[in-house]
Amino acid sequence: MKNILILTDFSKKSWNSILYALSLFHAGNCKFYMLHAQNIHESNFEKASPQFLNNKKSKDLKNQFDILIDKIENTQLKGKHTFTPIESEKNILEATRFYVKEKKIDLIVIGTNGLCPNEKKQANSISEDIITKVKCSVLVVPMEARFKGLKEIAFPTDFTNFYEAKLLKNLTNLSNYSEALIRFLFLSKKEVTLNKEQQWNKETLHDYFKNQPHGFHVEVNQNFEVSIEKFINKMKIDLIIMAAKNLNLFEQILFRPKVTTISYYSKIPFLILH
């Protein structure tokens, strides 16, 4: 049984992330913890009195959780999962860290309006803080994302890290993707030849996944997000997986893009593996 922590603010984007997670793990038997915590960037809450916080969170939160759990219970996706609501007066980062450790969480799920350049900095920062400051894999689900199965998975890489095979293998503990085709995508700003270390890591990945459908691809563009957009559209990618240690790559792709016309932020989920 896997333990999954879903961060919820009872919004439409949060509900969409719940539906996506239930669809992704429909064949499993998971413990879902639904966490509502203080917004880390809402400084007014941090200055508020305990009495104000208690008044705000008591009946309203209980009612909202009751509605949410009832809504889940009435979906066809409920399956054999269990659902536990959690409310916390800690800020969202501290609360997430605490419950990841206490509940032995395998995966965090967070919904977004779309991590695009036009998204509010506050919401963007929350997602970035969770990904970069909590040692747990994170599934980021954009508002427009809909689960239609996992047929095509993209894994952007520069082949400089040997641990990527282990990370991907660990994904089988989160979801059954045995039929999915994993496409390792080498991103480069110019035409280059892999060095010996990169070539060795690439061959290691090939050997490691010899019984799993997979392929290797190259996209060359000064802007990596343009390469990702092109690749997603060409291959009809369902999910993008990235290694958390590859900060420079995923921060440009996920948080600090230079191109404002891309659209994958609003429709393709990202799974960041620790």
Image (spheres, rainbow, N blue to C red):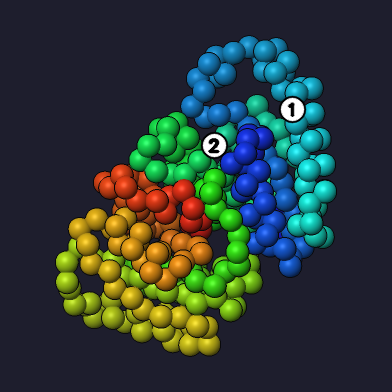
Mark 1 vs mark 2: give the one in front: 1
Please name the residue that numbered disc 2 is placed on: 93
All told, the count of numbered labels is 2
- Residue 161 in which image quadrant: bottom left
Q: What residue is shown at x 60% (from left), y 28% (from top)?
A: 38
Secondary structure under the numbered disc 1 in the rendered image: helix
Front one among 241 and 114: 114
Q: Position of residue 258 (x, y in %)?
A: 26, 46
Q: Position of residue 53 (x, y in %)?
A: 67, 18
Q: What residue is shown at x 24% (from left), y 55% (from top)?
A: 223
On screen, residue 210 above or below 256: below
- Say left or right for 56 vs 256: right
Secondary structure under the numbered disc 2 in the rendered image: helix
On screen, residue 57 above or below 207: above
Q: Quadrant of the N terminus?
A: bottom right
Q: Position of residue 251 (x, y in %)?
A: 35, 49
- Say left or right for 242 vs 77: left
Checking the image for residue 5, the label placed there is none
- Residue 87 in which image quadrant: top right
* Other-residue count near label 2 (Cα within 10 Å), few / some / many at <14 / 14–19 / ≥20: many
Q: What residue is shown at x 45% (from left), y 80% (from top)?
A: 214
- Say left or right for 176 vs 218: right
* Other-residue count near label 1 (Cα within 10 Å), few / some / many at <14 / 14–19 / ≥20: some
- Say left or right for 232 vs 53: left
Front one among 164 and 60: 60
- Asked if one can make out residue 98 in the rendered structure from this viewpoint, the answer is no
- Asked if one can make out residue 244 in the rendered structure from this viewpoint, the answer is yes
Please name the residue that numbered disc 1 is placed on: 61
Q: Position of residue 245 (x, y in %)?
A: 40, 57
Mark 1 / mark 2, whichever is N-terminal: 1
Q: What residue is shown at x 62% (from left), y 47% (from top)?
A: 16
Q: Amino acid at mark 1?
A: Leu
